[in-house]
Amino acid sequence: MSAAVGEKQDSGAAQRSDAPTGPGPLLVDARSPQARETLLGLKGYERSLLAAKHAGCTPLHVLACPDSLPELRSFASDPRLGEVPLDIHRDEDQVPLVPRVDGGAVIDKAAAAALARGEDPAAAGLYLAPDAPRRRQQLLRSLENPCDGLVDTWVNRPLSRLMTRALVGTGISPNAVTLISFLVGLVGVALIATRRFELALLGALVFQLSAAIDCVDGEIARLTYRFSPLGARLDIALDNVVHVILFGVLGWAAVPLLGAPLALGLGAVAALGGLLSFLVVYRLTFGDAGGPQGRIRRLLDKVTNRDFSLLVILAAATGRFDLLLGVIACGTHVFWLALLAVARSERAPAS
């Protein structure tokens, strides 16, 4: 359902409420230059309204300049707002007595949590908007993931930030980036399948590039609030399709070292392990409301990062795909069996 628009004529001075009572109504002041400036794919007030919506604030109010009224009326029907009412006000003297934030302020996770607790927006630094470079830095820093491994931290994220900054303003959808990452990953796997040293090494580097691109879809989704259950499912499914194909190709690449029967057999075992791991992860991630919790969540966070791409590069650089294949053939089965064991133990009733 589209957000409702009302141009209120209420009287009273704009004030804020200091009592932390949980998320409630919020006013976004969209009149400042920072609030109307487009930065990393969204205008400042658009990002503030969407962040407030996800913090649980409702209803939402916005104080607008006359020249921005048409844009705001259009934004009020944006599906990303869901069913949260959005009331548009044209006069400072006609806004309701609710907490206020500047539309150009960055509502990061900490600030959103403060709003969700009903705390004073001033204490969260949301009364004033910083300049564009500082806001851009805050937004990009908010994309950091505590579960990132070494390769993500030092290679993938720096590359993905460059790509995200270039792409986020083009309107490309996160799902389109997911498909691009998938296709680039397939190109890398195809190069590895040639069994030529130079092309296999290039393929490993292309596979690494696909891992960096795989960060971009999530970054664009978070910056523009275009995340969806479909996008999450598509991302995990296509990532694992590439991995399963790669595991089979590693068996083919190891034939000169191990002989066809052993290499292809290990490749099949590794591909099966990758498929079973995907099915278990998918079931645990999307099968229960709220997703995996506790030890399952911690295990997934530790293991399902992109550091694996570094091992592919090392194997290609040394020509020892056989060693990597052996590790994967064992490791994938240990992984899905461990996940099932942890899931069963967490769901077992306490004795």
Image (cartoon, rainbow, N blue to C red):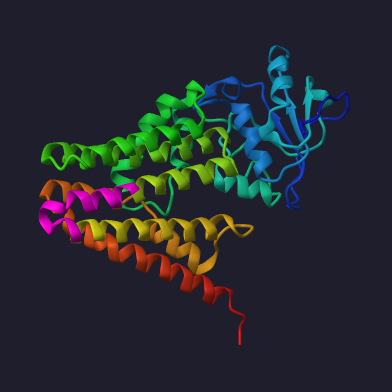
Asked if residue 137 shows in the view, the reply is no
Nearer to us in this view, 59 or 102 = 59
Would residue 125 appear left or right of 190 to someone viewing this image?
A: right
Q: Residue at x 56, y 48 (%)?
A: 110
- State the image coordinates of residue 62 (x, y, percent, origin top left): 73, 28
Furthest residue in direction front, as rendered: 261
Considering depth in this image, is 202 or 96 the residue closer to the camera?
202
The answer to which quarter of the image holds residue 1 is top right
Looking at the image, which residue sits at the far bottom?
A: 351
The C terminus sits in image quarter: bottom right
Residue 77 position within the rendered picture, expressed as x and y whole percent measured from the top left: 73, 26
Q: Is residue 210 magenta?
A: no
Residue name at image x 78 percent, y 25 percent: 88
72 sits left or right of 10 in the view: left
Residues in magenta, as a range: 245-261
Position in image of residue 262 (x %, y %): 19, 61
Compared with 173, 52 (above or below) is below
Q: Give residue 125's position: percent from left, percent from top.
A: 58, 40
User: Mainly helix, strand or loop, the magenta region?
Assistant: helix
Which is more toward the observer, 252 or 23?
Answer: 252
Rendered view: 227 above or below 275: above
Q: How many marks?
A: 0
Give the residue at x 29% y 51%.
248
Magenta segment includes 248: yes
Residue found at x 18% / y 39%: 194
Quarter of the image for residue 96 reads top right
